[in-house]
Image: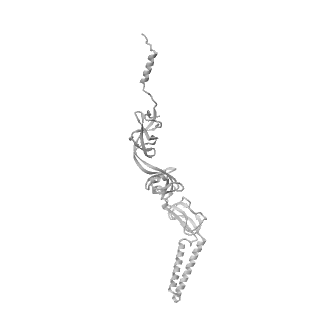
Amino acid sequence: MTRQRTGPAVTLALLLCAVRAAPAAGPTVAVDVRPAERRALAETVTAYGVLEPDPDQVIAVSIPRAGLITRVWVELGERVEAGQHLLEIATAPDAVMQFQQAQSALDLAQRELARSQRLFDEQLATRAQVDTARAAVSDARSTLAALRDKGIGQATEIVTAPVAGVVSRIDVQQGQRVQADTTTLLLANQHALIARLGVEPEDLRRISPGAAVEVRDVFDDHLSFDGTTRDVHASIDPVTRLVDVLVPVPQARADLLVLGSALSARIRLATVDGTVVPRSAVLRDDRGAYVFTVSDGRARRIDVTTSVAEGDWIAVDGDLAAGTPVIVRGNYGLDDGTAVRTGAR
């Protein structure tokens, strides 16, 4: 048998044919995909605030006369029952003197009326003089009654809670001298609380009374409630530089929350029903927003416009139908037509 030798020229020709026959192999990029969906997304504004007593349900406990605070039985934040002792006040000496003077004035007026009546009976005084004396008695009696209503006739008085509630502010302390009509403390209805939220001024025009709100305790997600905005203020708080929005707390949740708790909230603005994709699927360049889909093993760019975002999803508008897989991971650096493979990376 004769072995046929292959020359160098023939070998080179075979290699060139093999190279031409082999498909061009380029790099592929591993990506993760997720189908676009059709669902409703709600546009929201995030706000933070604090739990406070409803200002419409706060009672100011005041004392009608000057005196000395001799005892304070309650502390800030304490729950009290109706009729419970709040504080004790000793009437000021000048107020006691005023009451004594009013008593003396009444005694004098009554004596003068008796004298005028006696003189009238003896035809030594006129009817007008008797009427004047009688009016003086009436005035003196009214003055004394008014002072007695203020408690000025008592050496000491115990002030009690008019309703059940929570002591939300104390303005006096034991040993303090106070003037008449001084507010000593504020008593908040324990079943009427509000969330006072602060929003950015630029978001104010998009929020209106009645908007749905999800409120949570910053430190305990289990302490949450759903409500609606009641008041949207029209001025900026000089301290926080935000605009206050008030959300009443449902009575069923009020007993579970503590005044002063830090809150976070999402205020619902508008709802959009359309095609949505994960936020990570949306990229942007000088042409605008776009996503990549996968077709025949290659990335295909689709330009979109975005609108409402909620959580990890964002609504898009473009040539993209629900169910179309979009690249959510590995999409940075891709070009239209780049070879990709899906699955484990």
Color encoding of the figure: one colour
Q: Quadrant of the N terminus?
A: top left
On the image, the x and y values in percent for residue 331 come to: 46, 37
In the displayed orientation, state which residue is furthest to the front: 286
Q: Position of residue 54 (x, y in %)?
A: 49, 59
Numbered disc total:
0
Q: Tell me if residue 188 comes above or below residue 44 in the rendering.
A: below
Quadrant of residue 34 within the rendered picture:
top left
Most extreme residue toward the top, as rendered? 1
The answer to whether residue 313 shows anywhere in this view is yes
* Pick the front one: 281 or 146: 281
Decide: is 242 above or below 89. Answer: above
Q: Looking at the picture, does residue 324 appear above or below residue 110?
A: above
Residue plotted at (54% across, 60% down): 169
Q: Is residue 264 visible?
A: no
* Residue 280 position in % (x across, y down): 46, 41
The residue under the point 55% across, 83% down is 112
Image location of residue 297, percent across then percent down: 41, 33
What's the residue at 58%, 74% (across, down)? Answer: 98
Q: 325 or 286: nearer the eye?
A: 286
